[in-house]
Image (cartoon, rainbow, N blue to C red):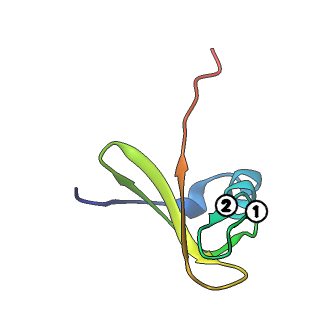
Amino acid sequence: MNRIDRAFDTRPDLEREWLQDNTWCDACGEADLGMTSPYEYEQDGRIYVEGQCRRCGRQVRSEVKVENAG
């Protein structure tokens, strides 16, 4: 259950922007409020981006799904 740090800032600009804008906040009960202070990590073979909700400041976390185009 160890977290492996990943470099969020090395993702392309549009991808980072999309990941920061398309979120779900449990506290606000709304989608797409966005996040600040994104932190990317891998845990148990899954990739996550975690940060604070732009509206309420509570923690939000999104799993990053990698899909093959072929």
> Left or right: 15 with respect to 66?
right
Which residue is depicted at the point 34% across and 42% down?
45
Spatial CA span between label 1 and label 2: 5 Å
How many residues crowd around disc 2 within 10 Å: few (fewer than 14), some, or many (20 or more)? Answer: many
Would you say residue 38 is visible in this rendering?
no
As drawn, the label of residue 32 is 1
How many residues crowd around disc 1 within 10 Å: few (fewer than 14), some, or many (20 or more)? Answer: some
Residue at the spot of label 2: 23
Q: Locate residue 9, reporting x and y percent.
A: 59, 63
Which residue is depicted at the point 55% across and 61% down?
8
Residue type, label 1:
Asp
Whether 29 is drawn above or below 1: the answer is below
Whether 64 is drawn above or below 6: the answer is above
Q: Locate residue 17, reporting x and y percent.
A: 74, 60
> Left or right: 10 with respect to 12?
left
The answer to whether the residues at label 1 and label 2 have Cβ atoms under 8 Å apart is yes
Instruction: Answer with the quarter of the image where residue 69 lies.
Output: top right
